[in-house]
Image (cartoon, rainbow, N blue to C red):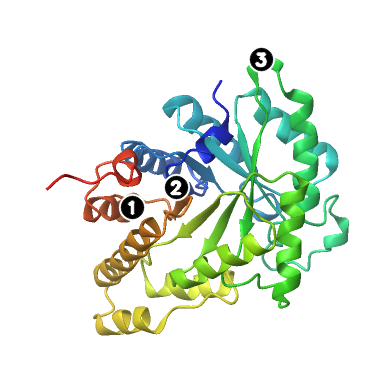
């Protein structure tokens, strides 16, 4: 069985898509239709988010296995520390190993909405502890039914982690996750590529030398922008992007065009700077991502990331 790390360690840029599990059967069917459409783009992998406080956790596991078993796409479930005992985490991780999942994105996670969460009640208080434990369970399962071990991903924050104002300390925390066994980093969304390149430089200087996959989200609505600002404190919308939004009539269609255009230019520039990977936050739709590929002149990820040039 090919190891997930082989995907990461290829010299070619990876392309991946993120989804969140719907709460209804109708929503799940609609999402799966979008996943099938995106499958045609040949993603390196897809990831599935994990609800805070148990809101969509079972749905996450169901979607992960459905995508993996019905499409064959490498699928990466998110896993958080919030409201979990050690035995619960062990059971989840072991279940993924037994079903052929080869990677997990390990996160501390967010507190449930409208709840004063006691972080001290969680068995694992931070992502580095969770990474270490996943690696431990992974090693126990290596070789069983051909399981090659997990490739473990963690989060990175080009604009800075909202909970860690000290940027030097922030890099120490990220290095701790890498030292605990992380294999790759997927970044929080950002809208100015200079933030990513600076983050990449700071990682290099901190001794962090694992693939850094850039998180890109095409803006869809003004209300979505406001929601992103609330969920990802410290997120920065560059002035030129805001001016583009203000020039529109505010309609959903106009904002979508601006968001897709901006994300396309970000992606082009990231490819020119040879990033390890691009991770599209799809918002459970396929249109914007497919339009980005189309505008960049590619029909699939192989063409987009192979770096070859036509002869003139």
User: What residue appears at the point 29 percent right and 41 percent down from the top-left corner?
Assistant: 303
Q: Which mark is residue 17?
A: 2
Q: Element at badge 1?
A: helix
Earlier sequence position, callout 1 versus callout 2: 2
The answer to whether one can see residue 82 in this image is no
User: What residue appears at the point 69 percent right and 57 percent down from the top-left corner?
Assistant: 207
Q: Position of residue 140 (x, y in %)?
A: 79, 26
Q: CA distance from mark 1 to mark 2?
A: 9 Å
In the rendered image of this protein, does residue 266 appear above or below residue 105?
A: below
Question: Looking at the rendering, which quadrant does residue 310 occupy?
Answer: top left
Q: Nearer the viewer, residue 8 or 256?
A: 8
Q: Position of residue 121 (x, y in %)?
A: 87, 56
Q: CA distance from mark 3 to mark 1?
A: 36 Å
In the rendered image of this protein, does residue 198 appear above or below residue 4?
A: below
**Crowd class of label 3 (few under 14; some 14 to 19; many from 20; radius 10 Å):** few
Which residue has dot 3 on it?
A: 145
Q: CA distance from mark 3 to mark 2?
A: 28 Å
Which residue has dot 1 on it?
A: 289
């Amino acid at each position: 069985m090919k190891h997930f790390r082989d995907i990461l360690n290829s010299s070619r840029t990876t392309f991946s898509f993120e989804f969140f599990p719907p709460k209804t059967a109708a929503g799940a069917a609609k999402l799966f239709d979008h996943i099938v459409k995106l499958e045609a783009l040949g993603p390196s992998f897809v990831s599935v988010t994990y609800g805070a406080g148990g809101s969509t956790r079972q749905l996450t596991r169901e979607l992960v296995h459905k995508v993996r078993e019905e499409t064959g796409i490498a699928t990466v479930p998110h896993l958080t520390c919030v409201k979990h005992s050690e035995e619960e985490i062990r059971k989840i991780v072991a279940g993924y190993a037994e079903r052929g999942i080869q990677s997990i994105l390990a996160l501390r996670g967010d507190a449930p909405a409208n709840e004063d969460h006691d972080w001290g009640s969680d068995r694992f208080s931070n992502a580095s502890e969770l990474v270490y434990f996943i690696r431990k369970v992974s090693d126990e399962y290596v070789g069983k039914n051909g399981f090659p071990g997990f490739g473990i991903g963690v989060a990175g924050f080009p604009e800075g982690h909202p909970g860690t104002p000290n940027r030097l300390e922030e890099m120490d925390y990220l290095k701790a996750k890498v030292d605990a066994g992380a294999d790759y980093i997927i970044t929080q969304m950002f809208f100015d590529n200079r933030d990513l390149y600076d983050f990449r430089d700071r990682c290099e200087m901190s001794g962090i030398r694992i693939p850094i996959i850039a998180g890109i989200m095409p803006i869809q609505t003004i209300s979505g922008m406001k929601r992103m600002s609330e969920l990802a404190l410290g997120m920065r919308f560059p002035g030129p992007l805001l001016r583009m939004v203000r020039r529109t009539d505010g309609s959903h269609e106009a904002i979508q065009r601006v968001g897709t255009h901006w994300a396309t230019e970000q992606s082009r520039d990231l490819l020119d700077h040879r990033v390890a990977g691009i991770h599209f936050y799809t918002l459970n739709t396929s249109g914007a991502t497919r339009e980005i590929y189309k505008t960049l002149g590619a029909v699939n990820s192989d063409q987009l990331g192979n770096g070859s040039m036509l002869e003139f």
